[in-house]
Amino acid sequence: MKTPARRTLLLAAVALLAACGATPAVAPVPPGASTPNMVLQGAITARSLNQIVVNGVTVTTPPLVKIEGVERPESELKEGMEVRVKLHADASGRHGEGLEVRFEDAVKGRVEARDATTLSVGGQTVRVDDTTHFEDDVARLASVATGDRVRVSGVPDDRGGLRATRIDRLPGVSDDFELKGMVSGLGAGGFTLKTSPDAGPADTYTVNLLGGATLPAGLADGSLVEVRSLKPVQAGQVIEASSIALEDRLSGVEGGESELEGIVTSGAAASFVLAGTTVTTSATTSWTGGLPGDLLPGVKAEAEGVLGPDGVLAATKVCFKASSYLQGAVASLSVDAAGVGTFTVNGVRVSVDALTEQRDAVSSLVSGDLVEVSGAPGRDGLSLVSTRVKRTSDVRPVIRGLVSAKDAAAGTLTILGKTISLAALESGGLHAHSDVSGVSGSTMTSAEFFAAVTPGITEAKARGKDQAAFVDPVLTAREVELEGDR
């Protein structure tokens, strides 16, 4: 792996983070650049007239896009849709002209069951998290009832099922459903369908032709298909197919770059499965938002690199998408026996749900206990939706996340809505040592330091001397680190 590039303030380590998909705005590619040099796969995170943002790349959309194989106006694209995009990107790789945009749902059918965080559709467990979009983004999951027909966009998760990025209600009440997956064990009477290469029993189905389907020409082991059935999944994970259609895989561009995001479903840093694609890394792969050892099943990540003819992505960069982190004392604890609820750490509200990995049972915590919390910013940008919670013995408080504001005159940064004062760093003057590109012995003024921080792009980690230093309304940092490529 790359040696960490760091700059050190007095009592602080500092390096610039170039977050995946985060680059200052530059001029878009002029219309007419018709050669694709990049492929994206991910959810639409922002939408405006004739533009979408996918994996942090702003894409000018063509007038017509393919939605479930049918050409439709680009206005039908919505936030949360998991799309595949071929584009001609500019030199920054962050803006481009979209040449082809495709959307395919992950599963479509009637809601067979639902609870506070999941749906069952077409035999698939569909999990909803804070990032999932709905037609009604106020009522959210409460806007969907058992018996409703829905279209689910999402990616496989590490628990067996799908993590939804968008859920739309559809008309009708029929039991027919559509499910996508990969073919194995192909025979004259059917095949095995897996929703991802590493699918477990819950995501593995036996598909037969009793529903009237025929095997399409060109079908082979490894093919990606959409299977439709007119009746629910039968006992033993059996689908009686009424139709079977071949689907396009994410295809790379020769000599170009591919980027995909999703949830790691299996593997470790050297080789893992992300959004149904095998990703490999090497000694030259750079890492942002975390270290290789943090690459575990369940982590949200983005991988950039070259997609080979074998469908394996050789990553040049891996970015952790849920890289916010807190360390400190628990306060304002309100959780039930299952550990579902909320508490605060360093004044930041933390939510714990059924998707949180509890290394130590949250229900056993009491106010004052020291914990480490990893997760993603909540929809308000001020709270943390936890993906992992565990106890710690380290009394030094920490807050890490995207810098949303800076004030060079006041010497402050804002992270997760909290004002972080760097005054304690400046008492001895600002001196920096740099080993970036082998250069050492440089100095950094306060102005240079704040110039290196770009709100909305730079992530920072601030550590206090003790718990008393991290008390609202201003958290006083003893060390500050802006983590760069590793």
Image (spheres, rainbow, N blue to C red):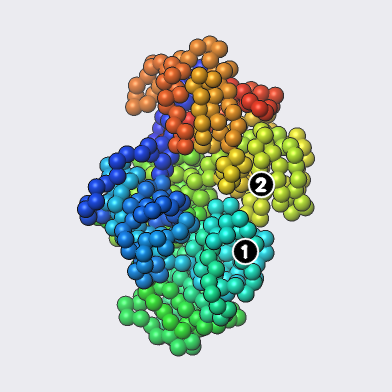
**Residue 306: % across, % down:** 32, 51
**Residue 2 position (above or below residue 171):** above
Q: How many marks?
A: 2
Mark 2 and mark 1 in contact (Cβ < 8 Å)? no
Marks 1 and 2, how far apart at CA: 21 Å
Q: Identify residue for label 1.
A: 143
For the residue marked with disc 1, what is the amino acid?
A: Ser
**Residue 123 can be seen, yes or no:** no
**Residue 75: % across, % down:** 40, 60
**Residue 402 can be seen, yes or no:** yes
Pick the quarter of the image with the N terminus: top left
For the residue marked with disc 2, what is the amino acid?
A: Ser
Pick the quarter of the image with the C terminus: top left
Q: Which element is circle 1 on?
A: helix
Q: Which mark is residue 224?
A: none
318 or 414, nearer to the observer: 414
Q: Nearer the viewer, mark 1 or mark 2?
A: 1
32 or 38, nearer to the observer: 32
Rendered residue at 58%/17% (across/down)? 424
- Circle 2 packing at 10 Å, graded few (<14), some (14-19), many (20+), is many
**Residue 329: % across, % down:** 70, 34
Rendered residue at 53%/20% (across/down)? 411
Q: Identify residue for label 2.
A: 351
Q: Which element is circle 2 on?
A: strand
Rendered residue at 66%/43% (across/down)? 350
Reading the chain from its start, which is encountered first: label 1 or label 2? 1
- Circle 1 packing at 10 Å, graded few (<14), some (14-19), many (20+), is some
Residue 202 in which image quadrant: bottom right
Residue 236 in which image quadrant: bottom right
| In the image: residue 159, left or right of residue 431 | right
**Residue 266 position (above or below residue 480):** below
474 or 262, nearer to the observer: 474
